[in-house]
Image: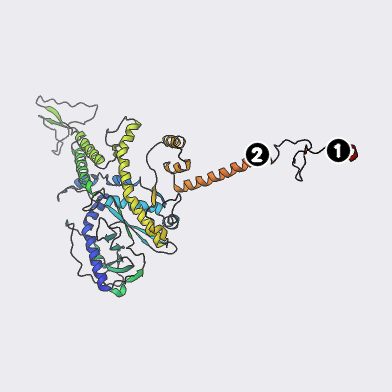
Amino acid sequence: MADAMNGAELTKVVQWLLAGRRAESARLSEVHGYLKNRICDIYVPQSATLEYRKLVDQARFNILPLLVSSLAQGLFVDGYRPSESLENSPVWDAVWQPNRMDARQSGLYRAALQYGLSYAVVLPGDPVPVITPFSPRRLTALYADPINDEWPEYAVSIGLPRPVIEADSPTQMCTEITVLDDTYTYTVEVPASVLEPLSSENRGDPLPFEGLAIDFAKVKVSEHGLGVCPVVRFLESYDDLDDGPQGIVYPMLPAQRQLNQTTFGLLMAQQYAAFRQRWVTGMALPEDDDGNPVEPWNAAVNRVWQSDSPDTRFGDFAETNLSGYLDSRDKTLLYISSARQIPPHTLVVGNAVSNISAEALAALEAGHQLDIGDHKTSFGESVEQLLRLSGKAMGDEDTWEDTSAQVVWRDTTPRSLAQVADALGKLATQLGVPPEALWERIPGVTDTDIQRWKLLAENETAMGDMAALLAAPPPGADQPVVPGAEVDDDGSAGGAADPALPEPGPEDR
């Protein structure tokens, strides 16, 4: 077993990890800002009025969270089956369920979809190992080969900043960080200033942190003894073998900016040019006693304007047609729908989807379901890796060495229950598939439901056997009684009289 790092080694590793964190922080912060609707990216001149600035603020037409939710809501792991087993692995009930991962797994998928990757840390605990999900904004892992390596060399998780109580300045902040390697965890506090993301547009500042010095006497070292750096990476996809995944949000930022700009133009037209303005020329306006012009007409729907001057002319300015802005926004939404394989009716794109059949709707959903299936493949490998590591953390070597175990994904395909029941019934009757094997394919059914159904089925079978036993006649009741037959001690008829015996004679009477 390797020895723990000393102060100099730990300082170098921390500098390396924080440099990697700073290199990716600009992209992650930009994506986070768009997702939280904090970035609009519309030009605002310094002389802009308050009305102009309010229109800019209202121009955020943010569809990025919907892109994430449309995929994340179709991802839910409902079981973990070892190879050659029909039941869940012991690690499922011993680690997954106590860590509330039924609910917390969604955060791992959403963070990976948003940023391209997310992480889960598994450490031994009492009474069960502890699983902690992390966003890449809170954890950075460095790999010798970022594409092909299963486990990182080192990782660092970042806590929340807090004020330094003993410091002279009330604004001095520190943050607790935890460094993980293949054997130990190291926890220490560092100045919060070295963890702040870059504010410039430079996305890859590799500057080392020469000023960072770690007092090893204040480092808390604990041994986890798992033999690997206990960090599992969730990748959004494996399609880019050069630079790694970027998530589904970052490539859509140009389209989001276009949506915001189009919406801003629409709001400006609504505010200033979406109504007809009347004009009049060739007449003198009356004035009041103070010399101020008096409006000659009280405009209303049921009133007519008239003038005694033959030189007076009336007219109006036509309103701005808003359909161009609306069509432009719909076309951008259609592009996003096509690029992200999202059904158009999910984005409610104008009249793009109307008066179509159920088969056409299913065809529109087909690409989206393929996209969900692709992410199930990617995330499924990470969940299997996570549960294998959890088995090792709880001392279950069989689970750790079982690389053939598979996760069970919940079926979230939008289909009617009658359609599903008909298809499953045909599989059972025409192909001979056991009905119990088809239960998990019913949409919305959980593993707990299946276990309860199995228990009810076993009880029903036992009750049926008992009813059949009670309805059957007692042993021997259906055998005819032969005259002269012997009767056993239990009251049942014995064998018939032996016909070979002679009839008793007079001398025997």
Q: From the top left corner, tell me how far across and down residue 156 is, in percent.
A: 29, 63
Farthest-out residue, bottom: 217
Residue located 29% across and 63% down the image:
155
* Label 2 to label 1: alpha-carbon separation: 46 Å
Looking at the rendered image, the disc whose residue lies closer to the viewer, 2 or 1, is: 1
Quadrant in the picture for the N terminus? bottom left
Q: From the top left corner, tell me how far across and down residue 218 is, in percent.
A: 31, 73
> Residue 410: which numbered mark, if any?
none
Colour option used: rainbow
Residue located 51% across and 46% down the image:
454
Q: Between residues 232 and 461, which one lies in front from this camera angle?
A: 461
Cβ–Cβ under 8 Å for marks 2 and 1: no
Residue located 27% across and 35% down the image:
350
Q: In the rendered structure, which disc, 2 or 1, sits on the residue that comes first in sequence?
A: 2
> Residue 471: which numbered mark, if any?
2
Dividing the picture into quadrants, the one containing residue 418 is: top left
Q: Residues within 10 Å of mark 2 (few under 14, many from 20)?
A: few
**In the rendered image, which residue does mark 1 sit on?**
504
Observer able to see residue 509:
no
Left or right of residue 319: residue 435: right
Quadrant in the picture for the C terminus? top right
Q: Between residues 413 and 468, which one lies in front from this camera angle?
A: 468
Observer able to see residue 41:
yes
Above or below, comparing residue 15 to residue 341 in the picture: below
Q: Residues within 10 Å of mark 1 (few under 14, many from 20)?
A: few
Q: Amino acid at mark 2?
A: Ala
